[in-house]
Amino acid sequence: MRRIASAVLLGILLAALLSGLQAALSRHLGGGWVPLALPVVLLAWAGLEAELLEGCAGALAVGYVMDVFAGAPKGLLTFLAVLAFQASRLARSSLAVHGPLGFAALVGGATTLVGAGALLLTRLTAPPEALPAAGLLWRVLGESVVGALAALPLHPLLARGQRLLAREPEPGLRGSR
């Protein structure tokens, strides 16, 4: 129970940090002209590294923060975040996802799942006068490419953070006796 609570707290803190960074970067990258979804990186990482219950709790927390920052209908991005986490776990078990490039590909796929899922669910449930344009799918694909590129420098930071949380020594350094 304690590990689940810490996963929720860590998910909220890291997702808020990445959402704030995303907002700052969006301002400098053309005011939103370049789409970016940095918290999805946490979902892909949890899919690779977290246990099932801790990962689901973390994905719920990340999805909630994404809902709050996006101003989307409450629950839409939370549901899609848990779905992306589960898809990342499925990819982990069936594909060889190793290193920064594999992680970047996984983040790109998770971003596509979240973005296209949000677009599809909104199109299915919104009134006709508020339907999002189908052309937004190109923006989702662009967001996936940018997200995959952003995952490359975040991969070593996440790996180091996980080693620090687990209190493991840095690779290449001799551990204590």
Image (cartoon, rainbow, N blue to C red):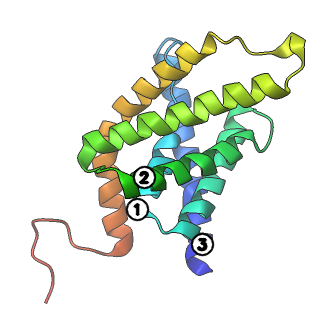
> Is 91 positioned to the left or the right of 129 in the image?
left
**Residue in view at x 68 percent, y 40 percent:** 77
Q: Quadrant of residue 11?
A: bottom right
Q: Residues within 10 Å of mark 1 (few under 14, many from 20)?
A: some
Q: Which residue is mark 3?
A: 4
Contact (Cβ within 8 Å) of mark 2 with mark 3: no
Q: Marks 2 and 1: in contact by CB < 8 Å?
A: yes
Q: Quadrant of the N terminus?
A: bottom right
Q: Residues within 10 Å of mark 2 (few under 14, many from 20)?
A: many
Disc number placed over residue 45 in the picture, else none: 2
Q: Position of residue 43 (x, y in %)?
A: 51, 49
User: Disc 1 versus disc 2: distance between alpha carbons?
Assistant: 6 Å
Helix, strand or loop status at disc 2: helix
- Residue nearest the viewer, comparing 33 with 40: 40
Residue 141 position in % (x across, y down): 49, 21
Earlier sequence position, callout 3 versus callout 1: 3
Q: Residue at x 28, y 50 (%)?
A: 156
Query: Residue 49, position in %: x, y?
Result: 40, 62
Q: Is residue 32 visible?
A: no
Q: Looking at the image, is mark 3 or mark 1 nearer the viewer? A: 1
Residue occupying the far front of the picture? 94
Residue at image point 32% right, 47% down: 155
Residue drawn at x 67%, y 12% as measured from the top left: 134
Query: Rounded to the nearest whole Å, what is the CA distance between mark 2 and mark 3?
Result: 16 Å
Under tag 3, what secondary structure? helix
For residue 121, above or below residue 139 = below
Amino acid, disc 1: Glu
The residue pinned by badge 1 equals 49
